[in-house]
Amino acid sequence: MSPFRFLIDAGAVFLAGGIFLALYNTLLSGVEIIVKTWRRTFVSWAGRRLRAMGVIQEKPYQAHNELDWKRLILLIATPGLAIAVQDFMLSPLVLLIGLIILIWINFQQKQVERAQINEDAEAVALQIRSLMSVDHSLLNALMKVKLPMGVMNHAIEQVASRLRMHQPPAQAAQALKGLPGNVTSRLSALIANNAQLTEEIQEELLVSLEQEAHRQKLVRSKTRQTLSLVRGTIRLLQGIVAASVSFVVLSPAWRDFFLQDAPHRVLLAVMICGVVLASLYFEYEVYQLSFGEV
């Protein structure tokens, strides 16, 4: 092979390699642009919608978000069941029931968050009573309180921070304002009026607050133990009813029976609504007994 031919072949190889690398780089750049556009438009929009519906749970005092599987399954299953029913009356009813269940899930979450704040407030009361029996400084006691990450832990840190900056106790106690619970309100009042209390009165109030916290914990524990069987029975009945209703609206024979005319449609709709409302009523009563103030 002549040197000239070798140079031509080598040039052709390098040219092909350059073209390949250029195309590869262009493809990567195009894919990167598409991915960034996708993330900035659809993914960002979908994330906002899922957060608004509560599917993605933002934890203000935690570094990560959580996916609510109950909401996600409900948002997928409800439209799917409505499409599978294929009826001008029952399909909107399925969507309405799905919306009611979603609202109920939001209510459940708020009740659980409220109960957690109450339990954390009781833990604060018990710890402050123990800590102040050794060190009579309220600020030192608040700084040594140990709580899981959450609303109450953040509020106690805010109170301690304000007291360290020599703010008046009444102003520092504003961090607890708006939080639910009898123990929380009494704890806030104790902190706000701490400067005007003598050691004897402060000790009496701490003992009273500790006793109230003990009583709340004991009554709540007994109530939940008593209602655990009731809650399990309700869950079992709900599962049976949901399976029965799904079978009725999807089974051809039962479907034809209930959808043959308007009176049968209304009868099925009334039965479904009655079952859903009764289920929600019993759920509400159980939650009130489990998480309500005692």
Image (cartoon, grey):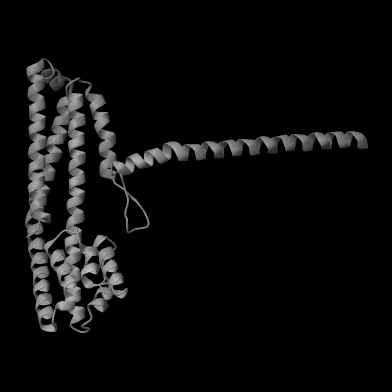
- Which quarter of the figure is the C terminus placed in? bottom left
Give above or below for 151 relative to 189.
above
Q: Nearer the viewer, residue 240 or 282?
A: 282
Image location of residue 70, percent across then percent down: 25, 43
- Which quarter of the figure is the N terminus placed in? top right
The tally of labels here is 0
Q: Quadrant of residue 178?
A: bottom left
Image location of residue 282, percent across then percent down: 7, 44
Give above or below for 66 relative to 123.
above
Q: Residue at x 27, y 75 (%)?
A: 144
Q: From where the camera sits, is residue 243 visible?
A: yes
Q: Nearer the viewer, residue 225 or 283?
A: 283
Q: From where the camera sits, is residue 1 visible?
A: no
Q: Quadrant of residue 172?
A: bottom left
Please indicate whether residue 50 sits to the left or right of residue 103 in the image.
right
Please indicate whether residue 40 sits to the left or right of residue 29 in the image.
left
Q: Residue at x 7, y 48 (%)?
A: 285
Q: Quadrant of residue 90?
A: top left
Residue at the top extreme, as displayed = 261
Please indicate whether residue 9 sits to the left or right of residue 108 in the image.
right
Q: Nearer the viewer, residue 43 or 66?
A: 43
Image location of residue 152, percent across then percent down: 24, 63
Q: Residue at x 87, y 37 (%)?
A: 7
Image location of residue 181, percent across then percent down: 14, 61
Please indicate whether residue 103 sits to the left or right of residue 30 in the image.
left
Q: Residue at x 26, y 30 (%)?
A: 79
